[in-house]
């Protein structure tokens, strides 16, 4: 809350009118009115008298102890994300920076702002990337001092991924040390202890988390092996790794979308119209079940956030935009089944791609 909102809240609770409060402080009623509307703020010498009059301490008056709830943070992030539809990246960045100045101790907010700004920045082109990336990375570094173990690991992971992307491997190396306590073997041992001491729910949850984390790790390993095989000109081996990726997604019950997505790159590289059509059709047809894994019995004790109702629709539009505007898919133009599929999906999206 801003100071004016705090004053209004506690003045109302004390059943004081603005005029009564003004008289006791030796100021005018319009001055109190301006404080409460956020038009102006009380002089620093009035802070202690105001706090005493309202029966609160100065920290409460200044919202020093106030922490944003996760719900409030989610609302702020959602609002900021919407701003990208109407404003430039620079304008949204300034809005995020203002939020950080307003809530300097809300490290979860700072980290989430950094994540969304970093992702957007990387899509804006080299000029924007060069101008803003180091300032955003500075927010990640700032979060390392938060004292929240999970948040520190999140920030360390973000920094590790950044320096791997920029090929600054020596800078990436120190952030690996932040994850020693989160290694699968540490978790497995803790899960075993939980299972043997009657904490069955915790034990199940930790084992399931290991499965989920290992799927993600194995997925990236197989994806890297696929790309290396392509770079070395070993097409058949690349095809084998792609099928391993698909089989992995099936084994871990990640859903049709994840089983098919890994196959698209190779089909496009080989300009295989039949496979491209089949894979793209499967991807678009499975969007509503994108998070079906969250309902799998394999992960019954884990808690997953629910995607927003419009998530699948937004993803469909983005995929269609990519498929229609991607030069690498130009070989599909003129294919009657492809044109029919795109036309159908555009109709589903209301003609907006």
Image (spheres, rainbow, N blue to C red):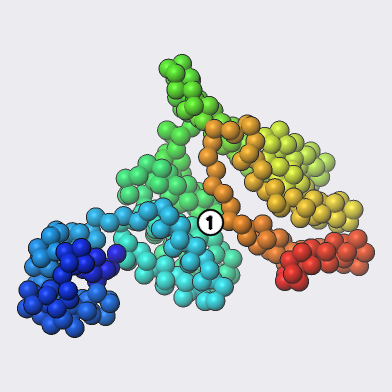
The quadrant the N terminus occupies is: bottom left
Residue at horizontal 63 percent and vertical 60 percent from the top: 310
Please give left or right for residue 67 compared with residue 137 in the image. Answer: left
- Residue sitting at x 42%, y 71%: 95
Q: Within 10 Å of the Cα at label 1, are there few (<14), some (14-19), or many (20+) other Cα atoms?
A: few
Residue 199 or 337: which is nearer the viewer?
199
> What residue did someone put label 1 on?
166
Residue 319 picture location, percent across and down: 72, 61
Q: Residue 139: in sight, yes or no?
A: yes
Could you tell me residue 77's position as x and y percent? 47, 61
Between residues 348 and 211, which one lies in front from this camera angle? Answer: 348
| Quarter of image, res 98 | bottom left
Q: Position of residue 111 (x, y in %)?
A: 42, 55
155 displayed left or right of 52: right
Residue at the image position 74 percent from the left and 69 percent from the top: 350
10 horizontally vs 122: left or right: left
- Label 1: state its secondary structure: loop
Screen quadrant of the C terminus: bottom right
The image shows residue 256 at horizontal and vertical percentages of: 74, 44
Is residue 178 placed above or below 346 in the rendered structure?
above
Kindly identify the residue that appears in the image at 32 percent across and 66 percent down: 101
Residue 210, visible in the rendered structure: no
Q: Quadrant of residue 251?
A: top right
Q: Is residue 307 left or right of residue 336?
A: left
Depicted 72 relative to depicted 86: above or below: above
Look at the picture and state if 292 lies above or below 166: above
């Amino acid at each position: 809350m801003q100071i004016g909102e705090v004053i209004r809240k506690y003045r109302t609770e004390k059943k004081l009118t603005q005029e009564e409060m003004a008289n006791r402080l030796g100021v005018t009623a319009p001055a109190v009115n301006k404080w409460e509307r956020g038009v102006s703020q009380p002089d620093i010498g009035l802070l202690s008298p105001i706090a005493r009059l309202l029966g609160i301490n100065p920290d409460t008056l200044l919202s020093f102890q106030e922490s944003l709830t996760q719900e409030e943070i989610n609302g702020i992030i959602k609002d900021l994300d919407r701003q990208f539809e109407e404003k430039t990246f620079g304008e949204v960045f300034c809005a995020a920076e203002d939020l950080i100045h307003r809530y300097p101790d809300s490290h979860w907010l700072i980290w989430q702002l950094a994540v969304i700004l970093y992702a957007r920045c990387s899509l804006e082109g080299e000029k924007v990337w060069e101008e803003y990336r180091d300032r955003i990375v500075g927010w990640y570094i700032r979060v390392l001092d938060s004292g929240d173990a999970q948040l520190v690991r999140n920030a360390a992971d973000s920094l590790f991924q950044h320096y791997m992307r920029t090929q600054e491997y020596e800078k990436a190396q120190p952030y690996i040390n932040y994850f020693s306590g989160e290694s699968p073997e540490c978790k497995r041992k803790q899960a075993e202890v939980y299972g043997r001491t009657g904490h069955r729910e915790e034990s199940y949850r930790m084992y399931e988390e290991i499965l989920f984390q290992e799927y993600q790790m194995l997925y990236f390993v197989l994806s890297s092996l696929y790309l290396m095989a392509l770079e070395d000109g070993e097409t058949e081996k690349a095809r084998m790794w792609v099928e391993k990726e698909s089989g992995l997604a099936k084994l871990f019950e990640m859903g049709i979308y994840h089983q098919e997505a890994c196959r698209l790159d190779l089909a496009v590289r080989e300009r295989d119209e039949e496979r491209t059509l089949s894979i793209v059709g499967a991807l678009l047809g499975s969007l509503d079940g994108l998070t079906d894994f969250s309902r799998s019995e394999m992960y019954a004790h884990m808690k997953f956030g629910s995607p927003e109702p419009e998530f699948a629709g937004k993803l469909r539009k983005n995929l269609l935009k990519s498929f229609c505007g991607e030069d690498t898919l130009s070989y599909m133009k003129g294919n009657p089944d492809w044109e029919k599929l795109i036309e159908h999906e555009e109709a589903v999206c209301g003609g907006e791609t």
